[in-house]
Image (tube, grey):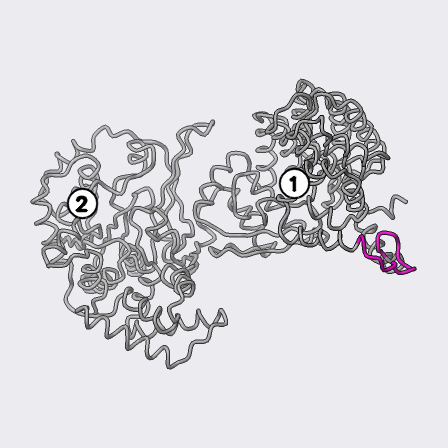
Amino acid sequence: MTVEVFGVRHHGPGSARALRAALEEFEPDAVLVEGPPEADALVGLAGEPEMVPPVALLAYSPGDPDGEGRRSAFWPFAEFSPEWQAIRYGVGAGATVRFCDLPAAVAFAASPGGPAEGDVRVDPLGELARAAGHGDPERWWDDVVEHRGAGPSPFPAITEAMAELRERAGPPAGAEERREAYMRRTVRRAVKDGHERVAVVCGAWHAPAVLADVPAAHDDRTLRGLPRVRVAMTWVPWTHGRLAARSHYGAGVASPGWYHHLFTAPDRPVERWLAGAARVLRGEDLHVSPGQVIEAVRLAGSLAALRGRPLPGLDEVTEAARAVLCEGAEPRVELLERRLVVGERLGSVPPRTPMVPLQRDLQARQRRLRLKPSPRPRDHDLDLRRPFDLERSRLLHRLRLLDVGWGVPAGGRSTGTFRETWTLEWRPELDVALIEAGAYGTTVRGAAAVRAEALAADAGDLAELTGLAERCLLADLGEALPAVLRALADRAAVDADALHLMAALPALVRTLRYGDVRGTSGERLRAVVDGLLARIRVGLAPALAGLDEDAARAALDRVDAVHGALALLADDAHLARWRRALERLVARPEGLHGLIEGRVTRLLLDAGRLDDAPGRMARAVSAGVAPARAAAWIEGFLAGGERSGGGLVLMHDEGLLRLVDAWLDGLPAAAFTDVLPLLRRTFGTFSAAERRSIGARARRLHDPRPARPDASPAGVDPARAEAAAATVRTILGWEARE
């Protein structure tokens, strides 16, 4: 019986290559790999052709029914990971392959955050590099191990060096002691099972401990009585980006793309790497000639020679690419780092890999809707008038309800119109989110509906409920909508704050307006909308009275939102009643903030409900009015809130521009001097381009040249405008109502 221990560095291409050669020479009949033993039953999947690294073992503890105590952890493997090469060798050679680290069930119970990487007491690479006279441990290890070619096995020397370091560090304790005790126990079990040649692949620091002559009784005492939790295991796809150290993965490497290249291209790696960099740059329409590639290879080799390195490393090839291929442009260097140094590789797992039903349902829908997961962000434009794109949209909205953020609407939200733009990016942690969402159901649609009902029961305010109702219609979850609407009606019935009701209304109106676009009915929302509007009108005046400036600005945005929502709803009766409520406000403006009075005056003017706008403007900025109130009135009238359009409306509404111009022209000189600072404050909120355009249009108002006889007073040719007007009427659906 022979036991060989191979101490490796996680995710090291030189270690992986040397380990594969050592295993082929040793020919073990049992291979023990550092990892959770709960995954022993999944090892055979590693030999299937559909298993393409990077992949990861996922351990998941579901916790209790309320979700308390849920934990998860990943054990990633890349093509260049020594552990992966050991697994693939063992499966291919017909050897018994087992994992020998502490069970995830024990690690989860001991550490609420998930299994720790281990409490190594010293930095072994740092110590060895300093002993060799090198200041950079990573570069020293790369030169000695990862960049090495053929030669004798490095593992005996690595184990001897680690034994010396461990002797100085003292005996292990805590998680490190328990892990190494379990590794030795696994070795003893393999020997007891009759295996003659046992290979153990573990982190280099643990290699001397696995070979140590420690009594079995000592290890049994160390492991006796350890708490455990229930754990499930599976394989999931992984990415190079998540393998990178910058992703906060404890055993990550800074350059997984570079390490993959070193492992898969052992001959002429520098030449192949820089040729690949040239391909990436050419793919972005950046010119790179073959001569530049040759010069970059020479420069990388010269830098390595000057620095005493056996082979140009990542630093040298990056500097060569920066100087020659990228011509010093940092954005090009960043592109190469993203595409090559880190890489955008996404692995895959076999179809028979254990999955929760929700994962399988999503995979089936991804295939049917031709939405292939990718680690690189990709934009998808969806035309909701096409059934295929509509179904894609519904799937993405359902996943968002389940907190599976595979797709993000452009601009942070969906507009709910005929077209949506989504950015799709698959991340490995989404598999954990899917597993957790599996508690709600076995299909994406069913789980999203149950989650929507749960969110409705726990909603904190009215606006949250109205947003949830909109999300249900976007996701075509008619089965969940009754529960959401019941909660919405119950909450609205007891909420007496008109401002809260105003915040809730726009989302409901959007769902009513665009329900038919998505093939869903919004009729059940009509009663809720009608009730909200009635209560808003009744409580409008008290809600807007006595506000300070900050509260007035917030209320102004809600007034604009309700006004815009009613225009979108296109219900003449509701719109007329809303305008009458606004008329009552400005008829008795006592207690109204100037911002709100000015904005309401403007809304009524735009609707053709005011005949005395110049007089109102004159009274608002008269000598008896406080300057702060006058400034607020002017700002509300001309600039309005975030949704008012501000200077853009003044640019294109010649009637409004003429009104302001006539009012200013009629002011006495002293009054004009008083009003000017107020106007400067308001116009200062407009962009420079808007101010220039408004000035140019104001000059044309006084142009003595007569207008064209076939043009309207506003300078619009009705015959030419009719074609555009007909298109707008079709988009808004006005022709169907007429």
Q: Position of residue 354 (x, y in %)?
A: 44, 46
Give the Cα separation between the discs numbered 2 and 1. 86 Å
Q: Disc 2 designates what residue? A: 192
- Range of magenta residues: 701-716
Q: Quadrant of the C terminus?
A: top right
Q: Position of residue 465 (x, y in %)?
A: 63, 29
The residue at the point 85 percent across, 38 percent down is 608
Contact between labelled residues 1 and 2, with CB atoms less than 8 Å apart: no
The crowding category of the residue bearing disc 2, from other C-alpha atoms within 10 Å (few below 14, some 14 to 19, many at least 20), is few
Residue 180 in magenta stretch = no
**Near-viewer residue (422 or 361):** 422
The residue at the point 44 percent across, 42 percent down is 432
Q: Position of residue 83 (x, y in %)?
A: 28, 54
Q: Is residue 671 left or right of residue 398?
A: right
Determine the residue located farthest toward the right in the rendered image: 709
* Main SS, magenta residues: loop
Q: Position of residue 338 (x, y in %)?
A: 41, 60
Determine the residue located farthest toward the front in the rendered image: 670
Report the amino acid beneath label 2: Lys
Query: Is 276 placed above or below 621 here?
Result: below
Q: Is residue 497 left or right of residue 212?
A: right
Residue 558 in view here? no
The residue at the point 7 percent across, 44 percent down is 168
The image shows a total of numbered marks equal to: 2
The crowding category of the residue bearing disc 1, from other C-alpha atoms within 10 Å (few below 14, some 14 to 19, many at least 20), is many
Q: Is residue 226 left or right of residue 696?
A: left
**Near-viewer residue (431 or 38):** 431
Q: Disc 1 designates what residue? A: 682
Quadrant of res 715: bottom right
Q: Report helix, strand or loop for mark 2.
A: helix
Report the amino acid beneath label 1: Thr
Nearer the N terminus, badge 2 or badge 1? 2
